[in-house]
Image (spheres, helix red, strand yellow):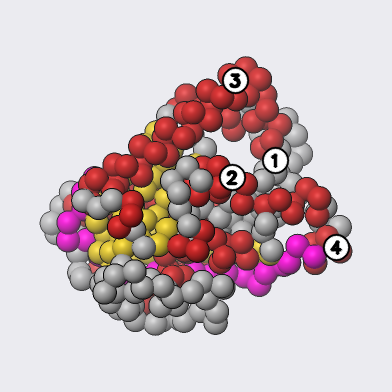
Amino acid sequence: MRVENLYVVGTGRRLPPVMTLAEAERAGLCERRLVWRTEVQSVCVSEGESGPEMAAHAARTALRQAGARPAEIDLVLHADTWYQGHDMWAPASYVQREVLGNSCPAIEVRQMSNGGLCALELAVSYLLGDPARTSALVTTGDRFCAPGFDRWRSDPGTVFGDAGTAVVVSRRPGFARLRSIVTVADAGLEQMQRGVDPFGPVPFSGRACVDVEKVRQDFVRTSGLDGILDRIDRGQAEAIERALADAEVKLEDIDWFVLPNLGRGRLNAHFLNKFAIDPDRTTWSWGRQVGHLGAGDQIAGLGQIADSGVLQPGQRCLLAGVGAGFTWSCAVVEMLRRPPTASRPATTAGLTRTVRRG
């Protein structure tokens, strides 16, 4: 979808303190031999703050940076991938009550790791559907903790970090312009996260802890690995190609790439090698320090490079996401000016400033 006259006016992120791989190993939480290939150095670990609480914190930061009043927000979308802290509960309404206190629609989006970008596309469509609508708030929030989830072992190849993220998109001019956003779906891969397990009556009927690798291997045995990988690559390629075409740019016109904070093996296979992307033009050096933030990698990554000054005026950024289901989303954002610094990060986490165009 080509997007006109919609802007990013504020971002926010709540990143708890990090736990290094060495610290996790000393605490008996992981084995280096099983994690070192990911090249992840540390992950954010919340000692008690839930996903929705972190999302609300990030939303307040985003609103301050946007200079937006609660009455200006016409939609709240909250994306998540894991347990939100209460049963049969609406976390999007919690974020709305805590941050806005208004009466606009507040809706949860649960499209796993692609939830943040899927929610952003829904927000864009909602704003474009009625010229009277001004702004939308998109948040994400997850805390990956025991006993139901083992951040180090539940999904080998990816290490999970806790965070809340937020972005405000608006008709009102902001520091970045949204050029395009696209989502591609292939429900034929839905079973990859389900395997051959029967449907259970209550959570954890089949096993006491999430084991993504077990159900994935069950699906591979019935469907064939080569065909699965081809479908994954086709979906990602289509999302990127369509987003670039809608934004009227080429891949070589992109200055920065905000990619999922996956382990390096998966990042290489599905993004860096396939599209010949230089890792130094991505958020990898930051992502390997915070971990995979569930639905929030792209929103947090955009905020990181914008607030730190890495993404400079005139430069273009491509956000790419993939989530179980399967869905692939991609957005092109053009930086217009430095954002108001509601809360400047203490470090750019290894990211360096690079100017490729004037």
**Disc 2 crowd, CA 10 A, few/some/many (<14, 14-19, 20+):** some
Mark 4 — residue?
A: 27
| Nearest the eye: 45 or 332 | 332
Residue lying at 25% horizontally and 53% vertically, measured from the top left? 249
Disc on the earlier residue, 3 or 4? 4
Asked which secondary structure carries label 2, the reply is helix
Circle 4: residue type: Ala
- Which residues are the magenta region? 1-22
Residue wearing tag 2: 266
Q: Quadrant of the N terminus?
A: top left
- Say if the magenta span includes residue 17: yes
- For the residues labelled 1 and 2, the Cα–Cα distance comes to 20 Å
C-alpha separation, residue under disc 1 versus residue under disc 3: 23 Å
The dot on residue 342 is none
What's under tag 1, amino acid-wise? Val
The C terminus, quarter of image: bottom left
Mark 4 or mark 1, which is nearer the start of the sequence? 4
Q: Residues within 10 Å of mark 3 (few under 14, many from 20)?
A: few
Residue drawn where x is 29% and y is 70% of the image: 357
Three-letter amino acid code of the residue under disc 3: Gly
**Residue at label 1?**
210
